Image (tube, helix red, strand yellow):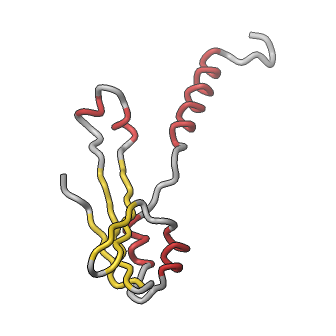
């Protein structure tokens, strides 16, 4: 073997490691349960937006406006074609913040059942 030339196993190992590291990247995950602990009754609407950002959905009710924040989780192996039907079921977390008169009136964290 020539000095400075990489062997095939070394190149394969580097390639595999690069693919493995690339699979770890992805979109930023929201931790809805932790977010729920930061919101308190009486907080202003602006404080909620500063902490959580704009809501994913809104609904007007007689009690005020409900803001919804969602996060969907799916394990990495749930993204494998054909295999994803049997493993890696999606889990959804939700946070509802009730805004009344510009202030938080209620906060509810839940995991919807399918």
Picture layout, residue 66 above or below residue 29: below
Picture layout, residue 53 above or below residue 3: below
Pick whichever, 29 or 95, lies toward us.
95
Q: Residue at x 26, y 37 (%)?
A: 87
Choose top left, top right, bottom left or bottom right for residue 11.
top right
Picture layout, residue 62 above or below residue 80: below
Q: Residue at x 51, y 67 (%)?
A: 53
Does 103 sit left or right of 84 as displayed?
Answer: right
Residue 101 placed where, x, y %?
Answer: 41, 86
Pick whichever, 53 or 59, lies toward us.
59
> Furthest-top residue in view?
1
Q: Residue at x 76, y 16 (%)?
A: 5
Residue 12 placed where, x, y %?
Answer: 59, 21
Residue 46 placed where, x, y %?
Answer: 53, 79
> Furthest-bottom residue in view?
42
Residue 50 placed where, x, y %?
Answer: 55, 74
Q: Quadrant of the N terminus?
A: top right
Q: How many marks?
A: 0
> Furthest-right residue in view?
3
Q: Residue at x 26, y 62 (%)?
A: 111
């Amino acid at each position: 073997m020539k000095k400075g030339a990489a062997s095939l196993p070394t190149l394969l190992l580097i390639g595999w490691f690069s693919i493995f590291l690339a699979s770890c990247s992805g979109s930023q995950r929201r931790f809805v349960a932790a977010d729920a602990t930061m919101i308190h009754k009486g907080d202003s609407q602006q404080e909620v937006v500063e902490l959580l950002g704009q809501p994913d959905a809104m609904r007007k009710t007689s009690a005020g406006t409900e803001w919804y924040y969602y996060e969907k989780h799916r394990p990495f192996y749930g993204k494998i074609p054909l295999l994803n039907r049997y493993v890696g079921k999606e889990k959804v977390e939700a946070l509802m913040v009730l805004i009344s008169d510009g202030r938080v009136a209620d906060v509810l964290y839940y995991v919807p059942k399918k």
